[in-house]
Amino acid sequence: MSKAISLRRVVLSAIAVIAAGVGTSLQAATVEGMRLWAAPDHARLVFDLSEAAPANVFSLDDPDRLVIDLDDTQMDTDADSLSLDDSAISDVRTGSREGNGLRVVLELNREVEPRHFTLAPNDQYGHRLVVDLEYPGESAVENPIDPIEAMIREQEIQAQRASAQSQVDDPQQTASSDEEADSSSASEEAKPHPKRDIIIAVDAGHGGEDPGAIGPSGNREKDVVLDISQRLADTINAVDGFKAVLVRDGDYYLGLRQRTQLARDQKADFFVSIHADAFNSPRPQGSSVYALSQRGATSETAQWLADSENRSDLVGGVDGNLSLRDKDEVLRGVLLDLTMTATLNDSLSIGGQVLDQLGRVNRLHKSRVEQAGFMVLKSPDIPSLLVEVGFISNPDEERRLRDPIHQQGVSEAIMGGLQNHFERYPPPASLLAWQRDNQRSPSGDEYRIQSGDTLSAIAVRHGVPVNQLKQANDLNGDALRVGQVLRIPSS
């Protein structure tokens, strides 16, 4: 009899536990807030929830609407207070669905491609439902610039100059060339030098629902770095031969790989990501500059080679002209490794210039360019830097980071470093390259890299030690790029 009573108690306890679990799982969720961020190419709508809630998202036509159904959920916020400016949403309606459910209807003013996902609680937010509205065919930045054609035009100019010089050096060849010219149709006039701008992609870190670090006085990293990025873009655009592209120009979120892809879409010559550091102590302060680590470059090379969608878009071949698709796997690996190495060397060289300039306006946290595997630095064909402008967790530095005068000083320092580098090593077809070619000293103390050149061969040809050649050009390795100009030190 006692055994039967014990068994009955166990069964009743189990039923009570199951009932409690069911009761918990059936607890209604509450929408405690709604947040919307509008970007040029998408909008993100976030529902802050008291509990996790399953959602069903689907589209309706005539008129265009997006329906969001949440099971066992109640609305405890005013959807009418949501700002819809610059988004694809023209109106938001809410109502009950099947008793305990919630239906949210978004009236749309343009075509969208929706996707949604849920997020678990973290240090800043509770349960969230995220609904992204992608705008087909739109880009986060405007007016893409294609310097590939300009580069080809400069190569034609260089070939014409080389031909003209060889004719001056060899009169017999000149006579032969004249005969060929007479037998052909009227020769084409040399195309004008494109004098294109050097494109600098300026990336303000974080954004939207990701505030980044928060200072003791409540200043958010995403706001500070956006202010500095906008000032940096203005500073860049004020210099002849340079053009800035803001990767993020408002308070919205972009994925890390999307940021580098936008820079590649814009044919950027350089990518700089602006951040503000933080630590669990208020004492650390100062600016830091990061380039990609060699380990990060190696792993990224492997990932790009493994990704079939990227293989046709490497080594600057953003328009397919320089595709690696027809190369075997070993050659693709060699070419990409060389490209990553050259890009990394350029990043380190530019980083040194930027760090030197930053040290004139702010304390340096690190006295040399650091290297790490930051995702935003992993573009194989664009030199990239991540600049930590200061510690927002330091009260004094937080205050200065909000000071417009200090922000402008930091912006001018970063631009000063970029300008110092690109004036010495201007990209092909750029205005700075044209200025350099037309102001070159007659002593012939510069050399433009040709296909097949090696650093050791150039050193032997000009009678200078390799180490001296590296030092004169701030080279950290032996990788060279066709079209790159080396300064030849006097022997």
Image (cartoon, rainbow, N blue to C red):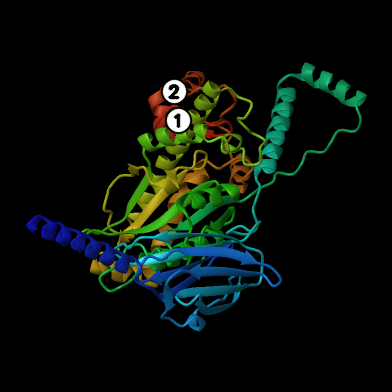
Task: Identify the residue at image location x=30%, y=67%.
Answer: 24
Q: Is residue 224 left or right of residue 70?
A: left
Quarter of the image that includes the C terminus = top left
Q: Is residue 205 left or right of residue 316?
A: left
Q: Amino acid at mark 2?
A: Val
Residue in the foreground of this view, choosing between 206 and 459 = 206
Residue in the foreground of this view, choosing between 108 and 6 = 6
| In the depicted structure, whether residue 340 falls above or below residue 284 | above
Task: Identify the residue at image location x=48%, y=18%.
Answer: 460
Residue in the foreground of this view, choosing between 90 and 403 = 90
| In the depicted structure, whether residue 173 falls above or below residue 483 | above
Residue in the foreground of this view, choosing between 367 and 62 = 62
Q: Earlier in the sequence, mark 1 or mark 2?
A: 2
| In the depicted structure, whether residue 442 falls above or below residue 382 | above
Q: Amino acid at mark 1?
A: Pro
**Camera sees residue 357:** yes
Quarter of the image that includes the N terminus = bottom left
- Residue 259 is labelled as none
* Residue at far front of view: 1
- Residue 464 is labelled as 2
Tags 1 and 2 touching, CB below 8 Å: yes
